[in-house]
Amino acid sequence: MSKVAVIGAGSWGTALAMVLCDNHHDVRIWTHNTEQKQRMEQEGKNQKYLPDIPLPSSLTIHDDLALAVEEVEAIVLVVPTKAIRETCQRLDQVLRHQVVMIHASKGIEPDSHYRISEMINEELDSTHYQEVAVLSGPSHAEEVSLKHPTTVTAASEDESLASFTQDLFMNQYFRVYTSTDVIGVELGGALKNIIALGAGISDGLGYGDNAKAALITRGLAEITRLASVKGANPLTFIGLTGVGDLIVTCTSSHSRNWRAGNLLGQGLSLDEVLSKMGMVVEGIRTTEAVTQLGQEEKIEMPITTGIYDVIHQNKSPKKVVDELMARDRTTEIDDISDILFNRDKD
Ligand SMILES: NC(=O)C1=CN([C@@H]2O[C@H](COP(=O)(O)OP(=O)(O)OC[C@H]3O[C@@H](n4cnc5c(N)ncnc54)[C@H](O)[C@@H]3O)[C@@H](O)[C@H]2O)C=CC1
Ligand SMILES: O=C(CO)COP(=O)(O)O
């Protein structure tokens, strides 16, 4: 049994805390919002984020970060990407011992283009932890909280940390695989949100399954192209954190990214969409970050650029689809073959 602090009490932090409680760990969850803490304690639920799901009686709820992390063996950081730096700075102030550092967030920071583990490494003093592990994969919080069968990947450059994370979370309904490809696992989890926005836009426009399959498949080609240049193993993208997470996010109405895209496709403005969501839509900022990154690395990313134009340039979704369909004719897998077969050559 380990003492674990889950930092972030949204849908995903709460669902992961429930898995850890099921595994008989000593679990505490932290929220930055005192009113939310009080409501969770009074109602025995986290009603805004996981409606009607009872919280385990063993789970303790904190709004005091120092108390939440006191003497814990592991921290699971699961706040939205835009809150990672601030939360790490706060952790840096209160940590008095070394912990195992795991994160389960999915995003890329605009301007710096940092992945989550890179932000953690920049903000948290290295005396507080050794390596970061990331937990990612096709996993809607709503389904995990109902104990529906779910598979994810725990990745760390330190194989023993990936195995520790696997042991911490794995149970009958939550199966965890290990990987050492932190770059691939983090980029797959972040970039699929862009394509999920696109899948939602396509559905909102009234297009069907053919269009969605095209977005998933050609989106995967874009993700693989960019991530391989950034040092990922291209084979990671045929796994859970690549195609697996693309499928679950692009085809499910649980997905906030799909839902936001769907409303955009129906003609709502970004402000109208965001005011309806009430939860984080990571793909919005990640689209901005990845469009910048694609330009910097000179990687062709027409779907990502098209979604950027809809979200951030107010371009008509229908026009973007028409332009994507009218791109120069080309072969299908030459660029991916180059990545797969030439990657060790220089
Ligand atoms: N919901 C899901 O099914 C999954 C979510 N994720 C990822 O987990 C991360 C968190 O997402 P969710 O829990 O779903 O988000 P959410 O929208 O359900 O909840 C966000 C939580 O973060 C808190 N928060 C907002 N600003 C904060 C700040 N400055 N400091 C501390 N806490 C702050 C909010 O109060 C709320 O409790 C995201 O990166 C998401 O992509 C990953 C896998 C599944
Ligand atoms: O990452 C997720 C499922 O794996 C959740 O996706 P959304 O953030 O779009 O809800």
Image: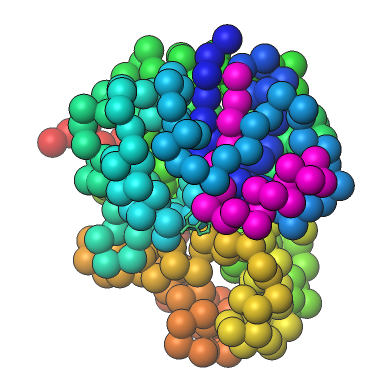
Viewer-closest of 71 and 173: 71
Give the residues drawn in magenta, as a range.
26-46
Residue 287 in the image: state x and y as whole percent.
44, 67
Residue 58 colored in magenta in the image: no
Which residue: 69% across, 49% down? Answer: 38
Residue 318 in the image: state x and y as whole percent.
63, 86
Which residue: 61% across, 17% down? Answer: 25
Residue that lies at the very extreme toward the top in this rendered image? 1
Instruction: Identify whether 249 is placed above or below 232.
Output: below
Viewer-closest of 130 and 234: 130
Instruction: Identify whether 151 is placed above or below 262.
Output: above
Horizontal side of residue 307 vs 35, given as left or right: left
State the quadrant of the N terminus.
Answer: top right
Where residue 172 sits, quadrant-wise, is top right
State the quadrant of the C terminus.
Answer: top left
Residue 34 colored in magenta in the image: yes
Which residue: 45% across, 41% down? Answer: 65
Horizontal side of residue 308 vs 230, given as left or right: right
Where residue 199 sits, quadrant-wise, is bottom right
Residue 40 in the image: state x and y as whole percent.
73, 46
Viewer-closest of 175 and 298: 175
Residue 240 in the image: state x and y as whole percent.
57, 35
Which residue: 60% across, 25% down? Answer: 27
Residue 177 visible in the displayed image: no
